[in-house]
Amino acid sequence: SQGQLTVEGNRVGIRGDVANEALRQQVASDLASNLNPSYTVSNGLRVNAPAQKLLDSALARRIIEFESGQAVIRPSGLQILDEMAAAMGQIGGRKVEVVGHTDNIGSRESNLALSLARAGAVRSYLAAKGIAAANISVAGAGPDQPVADNASAEGRARNRRIEFRVLD
């Protein structure tokens, strides 16, 4: 609902409210995959659910960075995860899925394994901060759900990300 699509040069923006995080990612992924590769998609879709909004606000479009090719979280990522732990504490015992993503450099198989390992590293860190590990599931999407064009360094950096999805 409240949908809006903007095109400015080779940047496509989409805004509006969707029912859940999976739909938010699916719409942006479908849009990106159907556009000419020179376009980048800015996903401004919002999940219209209080718990998901709380986690999205804590992440605030920041990227949890890892050492190149590894599942080692960089110090800037640890600071973000400290804030995510506080936000997850506020949503009580709700189950959350941590999804790792990569760019498309390297083989798909190695990127799938790396994205899963990174999601696992995030779960381990959050568990050490007092979030029940049983409430955190992990998934690795590898390079399969890009939010930007992998042809540029900026696009690849945006695609290397961690997402948090409140499970219904």
Image (cartoon, helix red, strand yellow):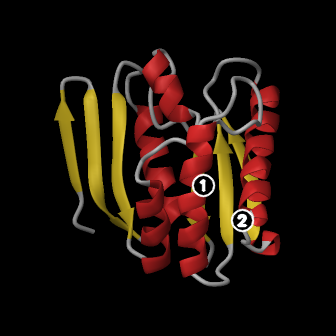
Residue denoted by label 1: 81
Q: Is residue 67 above or below residue 137?
A: above
Where does residue 36 sit, x and y in percent of width and height?
Answer: 38, 23
53 relative to 139 in the view: left or right: left
| Dot 1 crowding, Cα within 10 Å, few <14, some 14–19, many 20+ | many
* Side of 34 where 135 appears, left or right: right
Q: From this viewpoint, which residue is outermost toward the bottom?
A: 92
Judging from the image, what secondary structure is the residue with disc 2 in? loop
Q: Nearer the viewer, residue 9 or 70?
A: 70
Return the residue nearer the eye: 81 or 24. Answer: 81
Q: Position of residue 163 (x, y in %)?
A: 58, 52
Asked if labels 2 and 1 touch by Cβ distance under 8 angstroms, the answer is: yes
**Residue 20 in view, yes or no:** no
Q: Quadrant of the C terminus?
A: bottom right
Identify which amino acid the numbered label 2 is placed on.
Answer: Lys
Place residue 118 in its image quadrant: top right
Number of dots carrying numbers: 2
Per the image, the residue denoted by label 2 is 129
- Badge 2 crowding class, 10 Å Cα cut-off, few under 14, some 14 to 19, many 20 or more, is some
Q: In this view of the protein, can residue 96 be seen by the observer?
A: yes
